[in-house]
Image (tube, grey):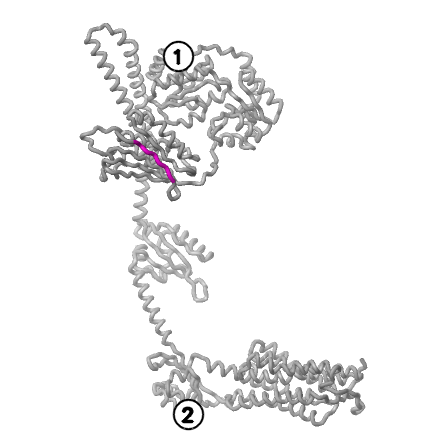
């Protein structure tokens, strides 16, 4: 491109800087306000239009001049459109998006036609260069669309001018000062465009005229604040404001008023223009007279048509500062006053409520000074209310409490979270101690800034005293319960032990009478025969009543253990059908003796429940026993079915039934329904209360349905629970032995132990009660057994090592080592592992005994026949071959232990790791497991094996 220098481009560049700079200023300092964006685009388009002319004159090549001519055509088309859009916004004329698109269609099309003119030549039919005062000027030949488009531009500019003139007529003086520069700004470019159209020339004066327009716009912006608030915005605000506005002249005649004022004034508001305001609204006359000359702003409250208004009068001043009128603004404060009154009443009500409640309400500032305190607060603190308000809380109690409260308030302030319940004690000025309970939360102002604290405080001294009394009573009850437990344990031991002797010796006497004495006295006279018969009857009475006393003691102790929470519950998955079948089997002798049939109806596919099987069997046995006891004819039916997430068990009889007034009593302790004066009680009155305790512990309930003379139904429910594997605790701590010592003991045993050639019927009795030992000795010796005795656990272990017995009968409660300790020692020693052990004790803990590996567990008093039968069965079986599992990763150790144990007669298996040992134990179910200590701990060998029912009684010996 070839350039030419000419002074002509300078005015054009000046126009670029003026219009472009003014547009940048407007955009930067007035952006966001109505009309600013349109005005800025208008200025940028004018700047680009002037730049186009400068580039045309700076280019010496026709091709480049033609290029700039076409490039600048869109800006030339945009200037009239943007001018019209700005005027529309300025004057507030409605212009929706559809109309804007229609107005823009022609300029957009013209801009595209100008850029593509070389194709169609509709705007310029041709271009050429001409000499203009020695410069290469651009001559254009006008095409067929040039004039129509020019006329459309003029129409847009004239429409905008007309809108400005219309706004001049109705606008206040201030906005007329803005409108005049606008007319000048558009008139000059319009005149230049007309001149250029009439007298074509290479020099287009329109961009230069836009520089003058820029000056006019600058005057309007900087002198009259044109872009600060355009008349359309002012008109919209005033017309739509909710407050009433009335403009008065110097004579207080109405010059203007907005729709809100017309609504307030009423029907006369529509004709108020030009009428003195005192005639339109007479109530304002006094206020306006008090306003004087109106130079100062005055505010007052007035009432009009039952509503309250805040009236504000301010002066209207001309350019010279003289007062030319007044503006009256009315703001409706009716709802505000009502809200203030409602708030006042609410505050009074709140204060009355706060004063009426027993708890005290308080407020303190951030310095800790009481700003509000109710009478109850003052009473709690122990001072007159007048002395509390204004005092600092740190002055109203002891220093320690004040420091604690100060820390709490600081924490509430720091976190913003209130404290709902804070307990503390204060020492009042009279020296007494008060226990208080308080809350504390932040008070915030409208901006959310903390200004203090508020809360509730109450005197809890009496409650604390009552709680302390209750705690003392609770401790006393717990001590009484412990004493009761100790008493019951003592009673259990002191009653069961002699009762065992009484029943045992009574049965021994009965047997001796039948086997020895009466046959020997068969030839005696009748008097001796009658005496012997009477003795036999008396012995039977002793046995019957002793057994009844045994039942009573067992049930009393059982109920006491349940109530005190000392029962060991063994919860596990239970099939209710099996429970019922075992209970029916246990009571078959009772039903058979009375000739009663027992029927069962068990629903199909009943889910399992979680419970203690022994205790549930106890419940069903009790219900079946009662049904059999009170039924002479008919049958007993036991039904089970599922009801609402539970399994229901019903035991129905055809007996005498229970009267309605007696039914609530059947589950009370020691209560037996019926006429106790005509029929002798047949039980203890504790069976059903025990059943109730057991069922409720399982989460169920038990009840009775009965009709006198037609029988009874006792029913209970058990909730259906999802059966989950529960982790079982280690049942007994395995004994640890150093491996070398274990092997040495085994080798010594192999070398020194003589073959066991003890008497085949040898029995060792271990009991600290000589009467029990004497009774058992007589019974056992009469049956042909060889008997030895030991009265302590230590003596029993020594006797076993001295001479191996065939069976050991073992008491639990003994001085020194208990029977459980002796059983554990026997089962963890390979030398005594296979000796059968029978526990005979007043302690009812069968599960513990079986876990220790004892063969049988009897509770005193015991049937000597059953005991002798069990002894004979164990002796007949002989020492069982005991299975031992050795678990160790060292093959040499496994081989050494296996050889030593096999030499003792044990069957030995082995495993080389913890998991293998667990699998082997579950498969073989050994009696003893020898396991390396670190393997047991690493793989939880003991816990895992004992968590399975079939291996929970396995003994363990850990070695290092």
Determine which residue is flagged by label 1: 787
Determine which residue is flagged by label 2: 274
**Could you tell whether 960 is left or right of 608 in the image?**
right
Label 1 element class:
strand
Label 2 element class:
loop
- The verdict on residue 952 being magenta is no
Q: Main secondary structure of the magenta part?
A: strand
Q: Is residue 184 above or below residue 770?
A: below
**Could you tell whether 872 is left or right of 895 in the image?**
left
Quarter residue 545 falls in: top left
Residue at image x 52%, y 24%?
926
Q: Which residues are magenta?
A: 635-641
| Quadrant where the image shows the C terminus | top right
Expressed as whole percent of the image width and height from the top left, the position of residue 332 reads 39, 78
Expressed as whole percent of the image width and height from the top left, the position of residue 59 reads 78, 83
- The verdict on residue 638 being magenta is yes
């Amino acid at each position: 491109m070839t350039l030419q220098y000419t002074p002509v481009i300078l005015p054009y560049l000046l126009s670029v800087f003026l219009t472009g700079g003014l547009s940048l200023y407007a955009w930067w300092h007035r952006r966001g306000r109505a009309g600013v964006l349109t005005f800025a685009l208008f200025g940028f388009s004018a700047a680009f239009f002037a730049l186009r002319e400068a580039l045309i004159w700076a280019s010496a090549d026709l091709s480049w001049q033609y290029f700039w001519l076409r490039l600048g055509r869109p800006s030339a088309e945009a200037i009239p459109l943007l001018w019209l859009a700005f005027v529309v916004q300025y004057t507030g004329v409605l212009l929706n998006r559809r109309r804007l698109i229609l107005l823009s269609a022609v300029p957009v099309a013209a801009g595209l036609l100008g850029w593509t003119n070389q194709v169609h030549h509709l705007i310029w039919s041709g271009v050429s260069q001409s000499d203009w005062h020695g410069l290469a000027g651009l001559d254009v030949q006008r095409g067929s669309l040039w004039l129509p488009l020019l006329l459309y531009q003029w129409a847009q500019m004239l429409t905008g001018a007309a809108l400005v003139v219309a706004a001049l007529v109705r606008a206040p003086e201030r906005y007329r000062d803005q409108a005049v520069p606008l007319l000048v700004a558009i008139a000059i470019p319009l005149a230049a465009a007309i001149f250029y159209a009439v007298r074509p020339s290479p020099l287009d004066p329109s961009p230069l005229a836009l520089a003058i327009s820029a000056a006019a716009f600058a005057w309007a912006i900087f002198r009259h604040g044109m872009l600060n608030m355009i008349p359309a915005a002012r008109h919209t605000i005033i017309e739509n404001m909710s407050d009433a506005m009335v403009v008065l002249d110097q004579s207080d005649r109405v010059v203007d008023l907005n729709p809100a004022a017309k609504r307030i004034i009423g029907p006369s508001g529509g004709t108020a223009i030009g009428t003195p305001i005192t005639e339109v609204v007479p109530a304002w006359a006094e206020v306006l007279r008090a306003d004087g000359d109106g130079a100062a702003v005055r505010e007052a409250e007035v009432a009009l048509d039952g509503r309250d208004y805040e009236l504000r009068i301010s002066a209207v001043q001309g350019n010279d500062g003289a007062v030319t009128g007044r503006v009256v603004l009315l703001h409706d404060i009716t709802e505000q006053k009502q809200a203030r009154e409602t708030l006042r009443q609410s505050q009074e009500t709140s204060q009355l409520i706060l004063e009426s409640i027993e708890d005290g309400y308080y407020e303190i500032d951030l310095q800790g000074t009481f700003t509000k305190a109710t009478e109850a607060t003052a009473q709690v603190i122990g001072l007159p209310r007048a002395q509390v308000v204004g005092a600092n809380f740190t002055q109203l109690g002891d220093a320690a409490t004040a420091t604690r409260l100060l820390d709490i308030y600081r924490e509430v302030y720091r976190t913003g979270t209130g404290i709902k319940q804070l307990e503390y004690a204060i020492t009042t000025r009279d020296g007494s101690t008060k226990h208080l309970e308080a809350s504390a939360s932040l008070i915030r102002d409208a901006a959310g800034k903390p200004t203090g604290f508020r809360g509730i405080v109450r005197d809890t001294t009496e409650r604390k005293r009552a709680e302390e009394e209750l705690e003392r009573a609770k401790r006393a009850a717990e001590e009484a319960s412990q004493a009761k437990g100790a008493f019951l344990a003592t009673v259990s031991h002191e009653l069961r032990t002699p009762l065992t002797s009484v029943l045992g010796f009574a049965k021994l006497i009965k047997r001796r009478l039948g086997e020895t004495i009466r046959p020997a006295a068969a030839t005696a006279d009748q008097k001796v025969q009658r005496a012997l018969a009477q003795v036999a009857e008396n012995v039977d009475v002793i046995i019957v009543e002793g057994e009844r006393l045994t039942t009573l003691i067992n049930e009393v102790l059982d109920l006491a253990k349940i109530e005190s929470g000392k029962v060991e519950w063994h919860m596990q998955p239970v099939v209710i059908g099996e429970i019922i079948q075992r209970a029916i089997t246990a009571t078959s002798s009772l039903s058979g003796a009375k000739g009663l049939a027992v029927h069962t109806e068990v629903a199909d596919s009943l889910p399992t429940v979680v419970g203690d099987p022994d205790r549930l069997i106890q419940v069903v046995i009790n219900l079946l026993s009662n049904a059999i006891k009170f039924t002479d004819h008919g049958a007993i039916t036991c039904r089970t079915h599922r009801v609402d997430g539970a399994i229901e068990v019903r035991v129905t009889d055809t007996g005498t039934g229970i009267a309605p007034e007696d039914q609530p009593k059947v589950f009370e302790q020691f209560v037996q329904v019926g006429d106790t004066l005509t029929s002798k009680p047949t039980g203890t009155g504790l069976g059903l209360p025990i059943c109730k305790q057991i069922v409720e512990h399982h989460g169920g309930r038990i009840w009775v349905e009965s009709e006198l003379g037609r029988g009874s139904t006792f029913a209970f429910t058990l909730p259906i629970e999802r059966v989950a594997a529960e982790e079982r605790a280690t049942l007994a701590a395995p004994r640890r032995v150093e491996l070398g010592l274990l092997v040495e003991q085994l080798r010594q045993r192999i070398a020194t132990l003589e073959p066991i050639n003890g008497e085949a019927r040898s029995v060792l009795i271990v009991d600290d009660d000589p009467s029990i030992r004497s009774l058992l000795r007589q019974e056992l010796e009469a049956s042909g057994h060889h008997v030895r005795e030991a009265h302590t656990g230590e003596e029993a272990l020594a006797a076993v090592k001295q001479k191996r017995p065939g069976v050991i009968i073992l008491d639990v409660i003994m001085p020194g080592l208990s029977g459980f300790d002796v059983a554990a020692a026997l089962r963890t020693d390979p030398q005594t592992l296979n000796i059968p052990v029978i526990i005979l004790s007043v302690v009812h803990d069968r599960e513990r005994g079986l876990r220790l590996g004892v063969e049988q567990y009897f509770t005193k008093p015991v049937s000597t026949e059953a005991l002798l039968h069990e002894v004979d069965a164990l002796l007949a079986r002989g020492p069982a071959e005991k299975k031992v599992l050795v678990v160790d990763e060292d093959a040499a150790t496994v081989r050494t232990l296996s050889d030593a144990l096999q030499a003792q007669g044990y069957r030995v298996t082995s495993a080389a790791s913890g998991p293998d040992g667990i699998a082997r134990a579950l498969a073989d179910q050994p009696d003893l497991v020898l396991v390396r200590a670190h393997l047991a701990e690493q793989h939880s060998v003991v816990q895992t094996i004992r968590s399975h029912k079939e291996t929970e009684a396995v003994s363990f010996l850990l070695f290092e």
